Image (tube, rainbow, N blue to C red):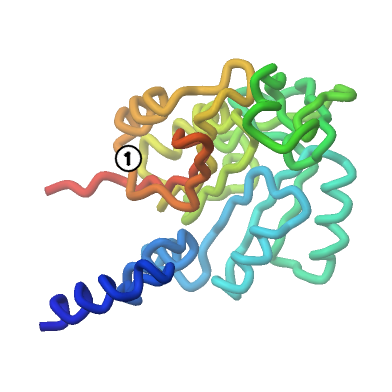
């Protein structure tokens, strides 16, 4: 009965630009609501890799008030803003380092828009996909780098509830540096940005991520916040969760 009413109402409303959806559908499209649903630990350990100035860290603090958040941001200006923003929160651990598959030092490309800074060089085709000039590189700088496995060993961290990655095309390198934790299913879920349009040189393909996570024993839960241009999917957020054994 409700389905019949919904279809009838939508036939009248859609020409006006409206649509009736079930509340659950809208909520389930929110990746943060989904993470809150999956993570039952009230004091979770969260890694915000590519924290920038702390917008997502702030979301996690609101979502999990008692969580411990390890944040990583190598760009000095963004890191200082982040550090000042959360100076009074002892459960937020800021780290002025990049996260990759090796420990040491790596060159970071500093772009016109700091959110687009990356250890990968900009693809010449990026300008046609994104805001003009935002990916133009005007400098490079050496930044320290760590791996998630090495950091967890040093900090005596046994498991991560949420591993968030937004490091501009270098997410697979960070995941390879977390291989030990992932192989042992000691990461509750991975929430990451997936860039599909040609934006950075050497960025992984979707198929590479699928193969990697399958090998680690994780499956894609869903895509969120898709960005399209000319009918092509250019970018999306993704949640990966451990494969449940039958």
Q: Is residue 73 above or below residue 35?
A: above
Instruction: Tell me what residue is drawn at x 45 percent, y 36 percent.
Output: 231
Q: How many marks?
A: 1
The answer to which image quadrant residue 65 occupies is: bottom right
As rendered, which of 30 and 43 lies closer to the eye?
30
- On screen, residue 164 versus residue 125, left or right, reads left
Pinpoint residue 234: horizontal percent, then vertical percent: 52, 35
Q: Is residue 88 above or below residue 35?
A: below
Pinpoint residue 106: horizontal percent, then vertical percent: 76, 21
Pinpoint residue 108: horizontal percent, then vertical percent: 78, 25
Query: Which element is circle 1 on?
Result: strand
Pinpoint residue 104: horizontal percent, then vertical percent: 74, 23
The answer to which image quadrant residue 23 occupies is: bottom left
> Pointer 1: what residue?
218
- On screen, residue 228 versus residue 142, left or right, reads left
Instruction: Tell me what residue is drawn at x 50 percent, y 34 percent.
Output: 230
As rendered, which of 129 and 119 lies closer to the eye?
129
- On screen, residue 193 versus residue 56, left or right, reads left
Instruction: Tell me what residue is drawn at x 35 percent, y 48 percent.
Output: 241
Q: Classify mark 1: residues with Cα within 10 Å, few (<14), some (14-19) or many (20+).
A: many
The N terminus: image quadrant: bottom left
As rendered, which of 182 and 81 lies closer to the eye?
81
The answer to which image quadrant residue 56 occupies is: bottom right
Instruction: Tell me what residue is drawn at x 76 percent, y 37 percent.
Output: 97
């Amino acid at each position: 009965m409700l389905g019949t009413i919904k279809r009838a109402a939508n036939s009248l409303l859609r020409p006006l630009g409206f649509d009736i959806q079930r509340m659950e559908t809208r909520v389930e499209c929110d990746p943060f609501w989904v993470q809150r649903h999956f993570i039952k630990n009230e004091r979770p350990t969260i890694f915000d890799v590519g924290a920038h100035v702390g917008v997502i860290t702030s979301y996690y603090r609101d979502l999990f008030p008692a969580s411990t958040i390890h944040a990583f941001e190598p760009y000095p200006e963004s890191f200082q803003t982040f550090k000042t923003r959360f100076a009074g929160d002892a459960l937020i651990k800021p780290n002025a380092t990049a996260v990759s598959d090796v420990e040491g030092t790596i060159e970071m490309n500093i772009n016109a828009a700091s959110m687009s800074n990356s250890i990968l060089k900009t693809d010449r085709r990026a300008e046609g996909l994104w805001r003009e000039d935002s990916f133009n590189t005007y400098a490079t700088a050496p930044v320290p780098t760590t791996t998630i496995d090495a950091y967890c060993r040093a900090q005596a961290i046994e498991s991560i509830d949420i591993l968030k990655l937004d490091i501009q095309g270098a997410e697979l390198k960070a995941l390879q540096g977390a291989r030990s934790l992932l192989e042992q299913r000691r990461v509750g879920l991975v929430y990451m940005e997936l860039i599909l349009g040609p934006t950075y040189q050497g960025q992984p393909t979707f198929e590479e991520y699928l193969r990697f996570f399958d090998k680690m024993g994780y499956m894609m839960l869903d895509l969120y916040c898709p960005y399209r241009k000319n009918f092509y999917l250019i970018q999306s957020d993704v949640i990966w969760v451990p494969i449940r054994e039958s």
